[in-house]
Amino acid sequence: MSGHSKWATIKHKKGKTDAQRGKIFTKIIREITSAVRAGGGPDPNSNPRLRLAIDKAKDANMPNDNYERAIIKASGGGDGAALEEVAYEGYGPAGVAIMVEAITDNKQRTVSEVRNVFSKNGGNLGAAGCVSYIFTRKGRLNFDKKTNEESLTMAAIDAGAEDIKAEDGSIEVETTPENFEKVKTELKKQGFTPATSELALVPSTLVTVTGEDARKAIKLVEALEDNDDVQNVYANFDVPDDILE
């Protein structure tokens, strides 16, 4: 169960609510733009990263016209601001390890803002490599608990999944990055459509945080996620049920 925290599950559940605020649309548009311009091209059939970004757009109920326009604009070459992908590492309350992935048109602005968020919320921005060794890129497919767990497990194993975890009202299928698309496609063919799917950084170990440290850790992660340039935030903390409530 390493790397699977209740907080990660809660984030998936609240994703639909966050999407209503509209800010998530901006982040998805940046991901689509970066996916196209990074060399993958505008065709989702030959660009897995773009295909995943489009799936995120659909999960967030983004109108088709919005992401289709973004693809057209991104494939236009020089139009629009130049975007760079950057990653930051740091520590939260109780020594929690945190990874931040961002897409920005101004690295100096972004690193300054990210450092400020860490400082204001009981953490600190660290040097490159300080916590990244704790995290490994994995594919994650999350299914509603009402999904038949036994049937899904057998189908996922046959498709090449690495692990299946069931708790906190959902079932999570974990894959290697290389097998992510294959497993996802095979499961869909058999009628198992994930509620959410992503290529995420998964921690090898979890740190249980309680009391004020737990509240501060959650506040820090949410503050980082609220930054316009930040795409993803990963942390290795777990929180007891009573604190989450």
Image: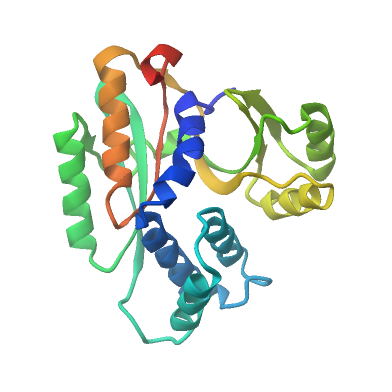
Specify the quadrant that holds the C terminus. top left
- Left or right: 163 in relation to 39: right
- Residue 47: x and y in percent read 61, 69
Q: Which image quadrant is residue 164 in?
A: top right
Where residue 121 appears, x then y in whole percent? Answer: 19, 32
Left or right: 232 in relation to 223? right
Q: Which quadrant does the N terminus fall into?
A: top right
Q: Nearer the viewer, residue 146 or 117?
A: 146
In-front residue for pair 130/75 = 75
Q: Relative to the observer, which residue lies in front, 69 or 198?
A: 69
Give the x, y percent position of residue 182: 75, 53
Task: In the rendered view, tell whether residue 75 sits above or below residue 125.
Answer: below
Q: Position of residue 73 (x, y in %)?
A: 44, 82
Q: Can residue 39 be seen in this view?
A: yes
Colour scheme used in the picture?
rainbow
| Residue at 80% over, 51% down | 186
Task: State the residue at coordinates (34%, 70%).
Answer: 83
Question: Quarter of the image holding residue 142?
Answer: top right
160 vs 245: above or below: below
Q: Which residue is drawn at 23% across and 66% down?
A: 106
Identity of the residue drawn at 77% across and 51% down: 188
Residue 91 is at least partly visible in this image: no
Number of marks present in the image shown = 0
Indicate the quadrant where residue 217 lies: top left
Looking at the image, residue 86 sits to the left or right of residue 162; the answer is: left
